[in-house]
Amino acid sequence: MILRVPVVSSIQGMADAVRQRLGSLGASSGAAAELFRARGLEIVDIPPPSSSQQPASPWSLSPSHTQVLEDARVVLGDAATLAPLLLTRANALPTHQQQLLSRVQWMQATFAGVEAFQRLLAAAPSDTLTNATSTGEPAFTLTRAGGIMPTAMAQYVLGYVWVGGRKFFRAKELQQQGVYAPAELRYRSFRALTVSVLGFGDIGQGIGQLLKAAGFQVVGFKRRLTSGGDRSGAAADRVTDDLQDALAAADFIVSVLPSTAATFHLLDAAALAGCGAKQPAFINVGRGSVVAERELVDALDRGLLSRAVLDVFETEPLPTDSALWSHPRVHVTPHVAATSFPEDVAAVFVANLDAFLAGDQPLQYTVDWVSGY
């Protein structure tokens, strides 16, 4: 029996990258590659539903694609697209398409963030969920595209920390004013500057390692500390579960926190008030929901924060009337700090597919439905 894996993704070349990974002798030699070369595994491109599709409107599919989706035990795709199709199918698709993805046992997401699933789980009554157990927890395993973001995220963060630490932003302001002022551009040794990284999983630790190598002091913040699992020697000078401790120590605050109920508006007015002594710069490459826009702007205006570099926002795309666009101490990028390249996602997926086919091996980057990441 042939295992057909549908790929439902906006990432161009995603299915081709998986096929190339499976077909390359040098890249993959596991069970999935062997099955693929024996023609027992097919990777099938499926066109995603239209982004303008109304709830319960038909998904335009060929008969062969319909069959693949009805039979699928494994699916590779974008969380935002597949979450409603897996969890709230009764609302997302018409009656004659209710069997699509109904047999899925495991979904590999193409991005590191999977909050689309958490939002639906929080909003939908448990008795309306599809692909769920009697307790309301999804009956399938979800894995995220972990391990591929740390380097790119760390490069983005280091770039802005470096620019801030060496006062290049200020240099540009002085240039625009026609002012030659060497004294204003005196900078401190990086050894004297502390970067607090909020969220110290694989991405946070990757950022910490690069910053330490560049000479900065690094404090990692985790809501739950695990003995022996923080790699603090390589990624941080110390790791804490005390948010106020991390904020008070920081010359730069870097948030890579995911979007969960526990992190929603975690950096509220009370938390940000603890930043006043050092007036750190704030860099957010995690999720915009960690801080309310109005409270972030207020912290900047009051001098609690010196500057903000934002790649993520409460609402995306960032509304045209947002105060962040024109704020003199805010730098905006449109959620581009790290890109999911198809070949990187393919490597994660194929390794997990090997484990799935083995049946007795854990999948990497499995999402905990309780914590949300």
Image (spheres, grey):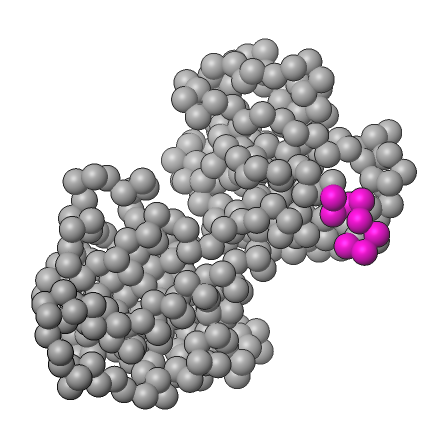
Give percent across and percent down for residue 55. Answer: 43, 19
Q: Nearer the viewer, residue 116 or 76?
A: 76
Q: Is residue 69 left or right of residue 259?
A: right
Q: Which residue lies at the image location 21% right of the left edge and 39% below the top edge? A: 320
Q: Which residue lies at the image location 41% right of the left edge and 18% below the top edge? A: 54
Q: Which residue lies at the image location 86% right of the left edge and 29% below the top edge? A: 1
Does residue 121 belong to the magenta stretch? no
Give percent across and percent down for residue 45. Answer: 66, 29
Q: Is residue 46 left or right of residue 293?
A: right
Q: Which residue lies at the image location 50% right of the left edge and 51% below the top edge? A: 339
Q: Nearer the viewer, residue 335 or 72?
A: 335
Q: Is residue 183 left or right of residue 75?
A: left
Q: Examine the rendered structure and indicate whether residue 236 appears above or below residue 48.
A: below
Q: Nearer the viewer, residue 360 or 78?
A: 78
Answer yes or no: is residue 262 visible: no
Give percent across and percent down for residue 36. Answer: 83, 40
Start-end of magenta stretch:
20-27
Does residue 21 belong to the magenta stretch? yes
Give percent across and percent down for residue 110. Answer: 57, 44
Answer yes or no: is residue 336 visible: yes
Q: Examine the rendered structure and indicate whether residue 5 appears above or below residue 230.
A: above
Q: Nearer the viewer, residue 369 or 214?
A: 214
